[in-house]
Amino acid sequence: MTKKILSLLIVLIAVTLGAPAMAQTSPSVLSRFLPEVAPGDLVEGADAWGAIRSDVPVAPVLRGGEVLGHVFITSDFVGTTGYSGKPIHTMVAIDGDARVLGVDLVKHSEPIVLIGIPDRKIRDMAAGYRGVDLVAEAAKRGSAHDLNIISGATVTVMVIDDGIIRAGLKVARALGLGGLTAQVASGPAFEVDASAEAPEDWMEMEGDGTVRRLSLDVGQVNSAFEAMDDPRAARRALSEPPETTFIDMQMALVSVPGIGSAILGEAEQRNLTEWLEPGEHAIAVFGRGMYSFKGSGYVRGGIFDRIVLIQDDLTVRFRDRGHRRIGTIAAENAPEFTERDIFKIPADQGFDPARPFRLQLLVQREVAAIEKVFTTFELGYQLPPAYLRALAPPAPPADTAASGPSADELAAQSELWRRVWQGKTVEIGVLAAMLTALTAVFFFQGWVTRSARFTYWFRMSFLAVTLVFLGWYANAQLSVVNLMALFGALTTNFSWQAFLLDPLTFILWFSVAAALLFWGRGAYCGWLCPFGALQELTNQAARRIGIPQITLPWGLHERLWPIKYMIFLGLFGVSLYSIEQAERLAEVEPFKTAIVLKFMRAWPFVAYAVALLIAGLFVERFYCRYLCPLGAALAIPARLRMFDWLKRYKECGNPCQTCANECMVQAIHPTGEINPNECLNCLHCQVLYQSETKCPVVIRKLKRRAAVGSAEVPRKDAGAIGNHPNLKQGERKESHA
């Protein structure tokens, strides 16, 4: 029995999360799409493609036989899986200076782009990459251009952007474009030897490379600014003698135990070890002279803008929270420094202490009242061989294609979704607060529903937040498309990476999976669905202005229930043949039109969504009741719920019909049972359960207590229940509740 429950739980979470997989791409994607794109459409003036290279899937872009640049498909080089669970194939051309010449989205399965986003917006976004300097991207870690996010397509746009930049850098290195060179591993790999010891004397550490030094005098700095294009920099030259020390900066990798102990001392080294989390590293930087490597512009929680650590594509900018000052230097014969600081390198940056890196120093000069020019100098660092030990070379994989993405590729994908989550901190906090409040209401629903007024206004307020914040602001509208993405992922290697690109959707699906075990589908459909909230709020407005409400006959209502299940099963069947076609048919959901795109769409889609809302003015939650395939999909595993929270009297349904008559979606059978597949957990039946004016059982109990309290002679009140207007005529049953 336990194994069966665990199996059902695993299936439930898999189906509800519907996480797309990182699809494996063919090494010859370019050969598939190159004949389909005219050269002039991608690069202005181009008239032909050259032959695809044999070493890398790149082809020359030609004009009259002259090479203008090189074209490639991003999915040939990096993972580009989008929200659909399939790769986004973007064609990119770059020139000899590693600048982007053109971008074209040639193949994808993103439903929001296929149907919801106008083609013009995507082309405008792609055109914005023309002129992007990949060399600057390599130096600035993705900050050299402004990323324009298209409303409703955040995940898709960020995947496209990440693919263009990372794939472009790989191509530029492979071909030696823009001065970039290929990263070729020569010789054995190394790791830090934690048992290695450093010299105790500072001069010896300088001599063997444990400590590296950058020394600049005023003459060198003036010469550097004179070589710049801006003549104002030369006119503002420093007036001190040329031999005056501008800055004497030295650096050491103190996270290496032997180096840290020699420079900081044993006690400070232990403190440093406790400060650093697993996988983190730290450098110590020392300085003296006219110029400060820290500057005075950073604030608490801010960034040090004068120094940056660079290792290949990796760029680390140091913040105040990752900074500590050094007291005294333990090494003998250490110079007197005016600045002594430690900077932390976070673990998620992918820094390799065994490989060379450099510290770039930014030097500024004022050329006008509020204008400055800048130049840079670099301090290179490589751990001496004494602190390294060789690693045995790993065995080559038998099948690279079957082994999945490389560690570097997975790390890059992980960095992308982490960046997305960091940018959504406020939204995640608000959603967490909403889920916490809703969970508390469900757990303490007996207490909450004592007040009909409080329950009503809490629900209306919550639905308003769901609609405005989750829906129109955050676009966190779940869809049956999420579930269908799972079916396309079953034949590929499963990965969380793509699903994690949309944090609010990920959190919502995880919450839905948990809620299905406790409360069924109603937790999402009744409270957290933006389109459902829009229907209910518009229906409440309709009631207030006197629009009549239609209650369908039970027999007709019961026969309309299965429609949404048929729609879901139909979409599921089509998805087995073609995911793309199923995603188009999923437009039966009006979510993209009404929520994601806020009705800014072609008129047939708008007319369909408006028609559903108009129907909902007369029949409350019309779409949820009869057409929603997502609700049907969630109702199927809702049978697995472990608890029955909604309280009922044995008189419910026979003879009392109050709850059945007032249920907004007619989820209560005439016999009194609540159908968990249709219930939206609005809690109205729990309000009625305690109502002193509507529930016959409660009314009768109160009358009995009043009779006992007034010391009257007890007598059987035959009309306490039998004469209640919600009971069937002629029934005169005595309650035993």
Image: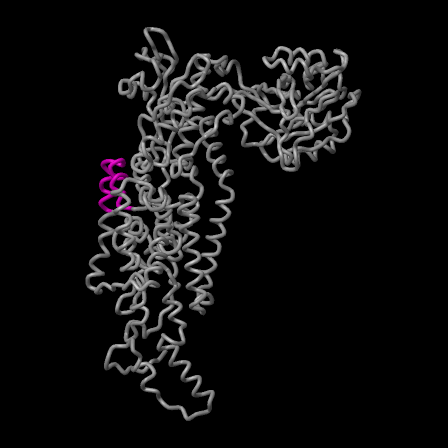
Q: Is residue 439 above or below residue 454?
A: above
Q: Quadrant of residue 130?
A: top left
Q: How is the image coloured?
A: one colour
Q: Is residue 591 above or below residue 732?
A: above
Q: Is residue 728 left or right of residue 251?
A: left
Residue 120 can be seen in this image: yes
From the viewer's side, name the closer residue of 245 and 733: 245
For the image, the number of numbered tags is: 0
Q: Residue furthest top?
A: 65
**Residue at 45% in and 88% down:** 708
Per the image, is 44 magenta?
no
Name the quadrant of the C terminus. bottom left
Per the image, is 585 magenta?
yes
Q: Quadrant of residue 551?
A: bottom left
Residue 319: % across, % down: 62, 33
Residue 258 can be seen in this image: no
Q: Report the predominant secondary structure element of the magenta stretch.
A: helix
**Residue at 44% in and 84% down:** 705
Give the magenta range.
Answer: 569-589
**Residue at 25% in and 81% down:** 731
Residue 1: % across, % down: 35, 54
Residue 283: % across, % down: 65, 26
Q: Residue furthest front?
A: 369
Residue 102: % across, % down: 38, 20
Q: Residue furthest bottom?
A: 713
